[in-house]
Image (spheres, helix red, strand yellow):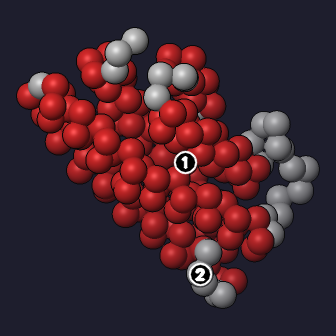
Amino acid sequence: MLTRLEKAQESWGGSHSVIDSWLEERQDLLVQYCKLAGLPPYERNDQALPAKAAIISFCEILVDYLSAGHFEIYDDIVKACQEKGPQSLALAKELYPKIASSTDMALNFNDQYAESADDNLLETFDKDLSELGEILEQRFEYEDELIDNLYSNHLDK
């Protein structure tokens, strides 16, 4: 996921301030995800679950990222696609439901772990975090398609 982010920043960085900001938020999200999951370079020697505060912090960043996409970025991209061509608009309409589905799954993770005081839920935390990682990776692919379409067809380079 980090490699994909680096490629996205190399390809589209500096082309649009909103996209730059969003990619920075994605980077923050990925760093927090790696810390929570104990992925390199944030490996842990113990098998302990992360602290509740770390989970809450991650969930806050997750919700901020999801919100930025839905309430800022996607609308701008769809507007640009409507103005510039039916093929671009068709791509946006194809990808949006897939992205929305991943939003629902990510918000379910947030609801389950950030807002719950039930420590028994932590028994499935590692599995749920891994599934969330897969969902986010797929989501980033869809988002990158939208950004690439915007960059390739609608921005003055």
Q: Quadrant of the C terminus?
A: top left
Which residue is more in the foreground, 140 or 92? 92
Q: Can you name the residue that lies furthest to the right here? A: 45
Vertical side of 128 occupied by 42: above or below: above
Amino acid identity at mark 2: Glu
User: Residue 57's x, y, as percent?
Assistant: 70, 65
Amino acid identity at mark 1: Gly
Residue at horizontal 50 percent and vertical 16 percent from the top:
11
User: Residue 139's x, y, as percent?
Assistant: 41, 43
Q: Residue beneath label 1, please?
A: 133
Secondary element at image label 1: helix
| Mark 1: few/some/many CA within 10 Å (<14, 14-19, 20+) | some
Secondary element at image label 2: loop
Residue 94 seen in the current view? no
Q: Can you name the residue that lies furthest to the left here? A: 86
Where residue 118 sits, quadrant-wise, is: bottom right
Where residue 100 sits, quadrant-wise, is: bottom left
Residue at horizontal 30 percent and vertical 37 percent from the top:
77
Where residue 152 sits, quadrant-wise, is: top left
Q: Residue beneath label 2, please?
A: 115
